[in-house]
Amino acid sequence: MGEFSPALIVLLGGLLAPLVRGGLLRNVFMLALPALAGAQLFAFGLGEYGNYELFGHTLTLTRIDGLSRMFATVFLIAIALNVVYAWHVRDRLQQSAALIYPGSALGAVLAGDLVTLFVFWELAAITSVFLIWASRNRRAFYAGMRYLVWQIASGVLLLAGVVFYYRATGSLEFGHFLDSGLSLTHPALLCIFLAFGIKSAFPLLHNWVQDSYPESTVTGTIVLSIFTTKMAVASLARGFAGVEALVYIGAAMTAFPIFFAVIENDLRRVLTYSLNNQVGFMVVGVGVGTPLALNGAASYAFCNILFEGLLFMAMGAVLYRTGTIKGSELGGLYKTMPWTTFFCLIGAASISAFPLFSGFVTKGLIISGAAKEHYFWVWLTLLFAAAGVFHHSGIKIPYFAFFAHDSGKRPKEAPLHMLIAMGVSAALCVGIGVAQLFTGPAGDPLYALMPFEVKIEDAHSPYIAYTAPHILVQLQILFFSGLAFAVLQKTGLYPPELKSTNLDSDWFYRVPGRALLSWTAGATRALWRLSWRLFTGRVERAMERIYAVHGPEGRLARTWPVGSMALWTAVVLGAALALAFIA
């Protein structure tokens, strides 16, 4: 296929998918797309492909290096798993969006220049909203509109940043921006940084995730949870690695979602807060910027797509079979959904970084990277956040969905195709977690895929996940987090699962923002009415004056005597003759 981009294979295939007749044939076609794209990705090898000219500049459609290859690989795995999970879906619009959107995100990860990045960035924004609107209800429509506002804002900032960057440097290359000599406070880099920050869901820029993802369909939420934030993390790693501000932004991201996740009743919304928390670990790794930390950010993103996707799949299966995802309405489902329960527990163990699971061998890279660069308080925050993850995703999700009180619901087990997708995800979570025990760090396939050689910088020795201190510290975190949950449950201090709506940063636009909008609208209406009254008053007075002169009783309507008329006619005629003589 020459230098045809793997991203275009998925994207163009998504455009063609609705034209394929027959549900089974369409599904087979969709499943073939990530396989073809993966074959093309690894056939290329490292390098730049698909160069093209635009206004005298050589741009690069596909750049494959260690960073982009790792993200592209897991994106393609996720696309294939999503196709299998959504095998029952016959909504052609949803099926098409579930390919075009990931294909666009893949294109952004592989982009070698800022123009290509912007095009794929906007395509991902526009096509992803259709997965929210696919629910076809009022809540989803308005959530999708709010989501689109945030996504377009990110695109506008990115475009402005690209224009400013080109004017300042004359370059359109998508590389490490600070190497250009510009500071982060320069308008170009500030715009690009905020554009990446919106899609990474930085604090106060994050609530579009909780607002929109849970309003999507059973399968749409899973697709949405994977690509946008990871695309942004990959972009941050390429453009802003080592920017210290990211360390503190990421630390805040890991901590604050924990408190909202604890009180949230909607279990898919709990997972969206978990998504904020998990991306925070990646952002910290990017901010630390050392090879160890960047390896951690990339590999943790790789594993997070698998285990967080698995948790979203499990909750999607619960919603598909029961019609609800509220923790207050679930419980006891393990009796009739044992496989879904089992796979959910594997996802919970992985996200909690239990030894022998994928989170354990990757999260430690980020935490070790922060510790080695002497970010002591950030390191403590990451340990606290790691305990919080176990609390709300490792315990709360499976406990309230499958155990806790018996809701009396006895749904069927998830459909076979959903179980296959969950089973493959679970197998990858376990396989990645135990591989190092059999191969050692040098032979670990995940470590081999990382952007940099996995070493501890000080000693130049391989990073080994399975050391006694690492295992002991992680087990202590898990033990005390579990103990805290048990004590709070037994004493009745744990927040109950209630039917409620929790306001987050959206409080600013839902409460004072709505009041300000209402006041502004009222003030505008009052000002318009006053202006209209003044205008119409002046018009009425002008008409009265005209009427007084030209109306039936006006001066010009009165009958003049014949003598006066003759006199004035003679005056006008004399004036005309005088002017003619002078001329």
Image: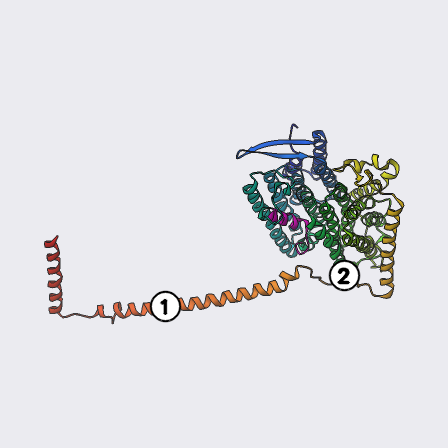
Q: Amino acid at mark 2?
A: Ile
Choose the circle earlier in sequence order: 2 or 1: 2
| Residue drawn at the location 13% of the way across and 69% of the way down | 564
Q: Measure the alpha-carbon separation of dots 2 and 1.
A: 60 Å
| Vertical placement of residue 529 versus 400, above or below | below
Report the magenta residues as a range. Answer: 189-205
Residue 272 visible in the picture: no
| Residue 209 image position (x, y, % from top left) | 68, 53
Q: Main secondary structure of the magenta part?
A: helix
Is 351 inside the magenta-drawn segment?
no
| Residue drawn at the location 71% of the way across and 53% of the way down | 214
Q: Residue furthest bottom?
A: 553
Is 196 inside the magenta-drawn segment?
yes
Q: Secondary structure at mark 1?
A: helix
| Residue 87 image position (x, y, % from top left) | 74, 42
Pointer 2 residue: 263
Q: Amino acid at mark 1?
A: Arg
Pointer 1 residue: 538
